Amino acid sequence: MSDIYQKYDEFKNFEILFKGYDDEIHKVSGKVRAIESSNIIVYASKKKNRFTEIPEGASIKVYVYTENGIYTADSKIIFSEDYDEDHVIYTIDYPSHSRHSQRREYFRADMNIPLKVTIVKDVLSGISDTIKVRSRDVCGNGVSFVSEYKITNHEEIFVALEFPEKVIETAAKLVYTMEKENHGKMYYVTALHFTTITPRNIDFIVKKCFLYQLRLKNME
């Protein structure tokens, strides 16, 4: 698995997740500048990253985004230094316990994101229903939610995921609808697959999922 790091010029992104001096989890996004025998040199912009001060000796989690999915690994900060007033360079241990995670779009988290789901009942007349719910879980290629509305396979569906930073809009198709009952009241668990989402928005959602899961692990 370590061969992945020798192809660092093909990385779409290289991220370091760490616990800062404030005991909060932060992320630095950068580029691999060089590979040495026992460590990796990472170059990051201070302007693009809010927190760049990583305690020396800190254990870190590395996420490598490639065309083949996401690789995760464990590492440690050896030292860091300012390259210039706008950039910082980190020297990290050569990553260990490298593993290839599932394709990036399938990484799922139980995040409750506000959703606006529009169901087109009749394309010719433009008749549609819109429901506002919150996600039960979300990943880069789909979302599930609970509602009192039953969606069928014959309807066109459009979804708006309302993240604090941005709203992601995409067409979707029905994966399943499961009918449930709670104290005599019927409701539906619905799963949708995104069909027109852009790679950039997939990356945005996946990063949100990673950060969410990391915060949960650090609360355990």
Image: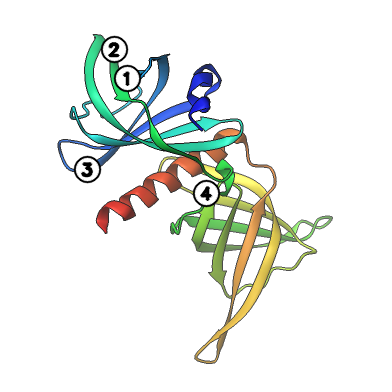
According to the image, label 1 marks what residue? 47
Q: Image quadrant of residue 143? A: bottom right
> Dot 1, how many residues are within 10 Å of its Cα: few (below 14), some (14-19), or many (20+)?
few
Q: Distance between the residues labelled 4 and 3?
A: 23 Å
- Compared across the picture, whether 186 is left or right of 220 comes to right
- Residue in the picture at 51% in, 53% down: 108
* Furthest-front residue in this view: 37
The residue that mark 4 highlights is 107
Label 2 amino acid?
Asp
| Residue 60 % position (x, y) | 30, 36
Q: Distance between the residues labelled 1 and 2?
A: 7 Å
Q: Name the residue under label 2.
A: 86
Lower position in the chain sequence, tag 1 or tag 2: 1
Name the residue tied to disc 3: 24
Amino acid type, residue under disc 3 in the picture: Glu
Residue 56 image position (x, y, % from top left) = 18, 27
Q: Which of marks 2 and 4 is nearer the N terminus?
A: 2
Q: For the residues marked 1 and 4, what is the alpha-carbon distance in whole angstroms?
A: 28 Å
Which color mode does the image show? rainbow
Give the mark, 1 or 4, whose residue is nearer the N terminus.
1
Q: Nearer the viewer, residue 141 or 197?
A: 141
* CA neighbours of label 2 inside 10 A, class few (<14), some (14 to 19), many (20+): few
